[in-house]
Image: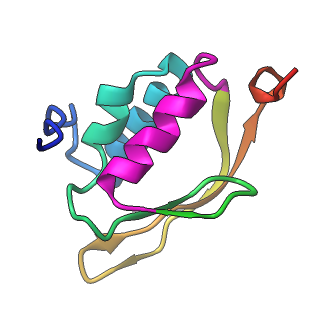
Amino acid sequence: MATPRPPAAHLQTTPDDVEAQFYEALREADIGKLMAVWSDDDDIVCVHPGGPRVIGTRAIRASFEAIFERGGIPVQPGSVHRPAWRGLARSDLEKSARVSHLRPP
């Protein structure tokens, strides 16, 4: 059975809007909002801090669902560098988050 496609992201008019929705979804532990900013291509990749590469929509969704089992992540973007080239945007940034609640007891 196919995985239901997430709803379209809100306010995806600029890379800043998409990034803001991503961090809002992390803080709220909102898997639908989070997955709405990802492409639905099977070759997308996510690397969680200190973790291995997670490849594909299903695997990325499952990884965030596992993270969200303990609640949202109080993350705040810090220093941001956004190079742009031929209509593509990338964000290189430092993040700060208190993740002690994510560690196993």
> Main SS type for the magenta part?
helix
Identify whether 72 is placed above or below 1.
above
Q: Residue furthest right?
A: 105
Q: Tell me if residue 23 can be seen.
A: no
Q: Quadrant where the C terminus lies? A: top right
Side (left or right) of 74 relative to 36: right
Can you tell which quarter of the image residue 99 is in? top right
Q: Nearer the viewer, residue 88 or 73?
A: 73
Q: Residue furthest bottom?
A: 86
Identify whether 83 is placed above or below 69.
below
Q: How is the image coloured?
A: rainbow
Can you tell which quarter of the image residue 41 is in? bottom left
For image coordinates 11% across by 41% down, the residue present is 1
**In the rendered structure, does residue 41 fall within the stretch colored magenta?**
no
Side (left or right) of 35 relative to 92: left
Q: Residue 23: give x, y in percent of width and height.
A: 50, 34
Q: Tell me if residue 2 can be seen.
A: yes
Q: Residue 69: give x, y in percent of width and height.
A: 56, 20
For image coordinates 75% across by 57% down, the residue present is 50
For image coordinates 65% across by 32% down, the residue present is 75
Side (left or right) of 87 relative to 8: right
Identify whether 34 is placed above or below 55.
above
The segment highlighted magenta reads: 55-74
Q: Nearer the viewer, residue 36 or 102?
A: 102
Q: Residue 65: give x, y in percent of width and height.
A: 47, 31
- Number of labels in the image equals 0
**In the rendered structure, does residue 62 fall within the stretch colored magenta?**
yes
Can you tell which quarter of the image residue 35 is in? top left
Q: Residue 37: give x, y in percent of width and height.
A: 30, 45
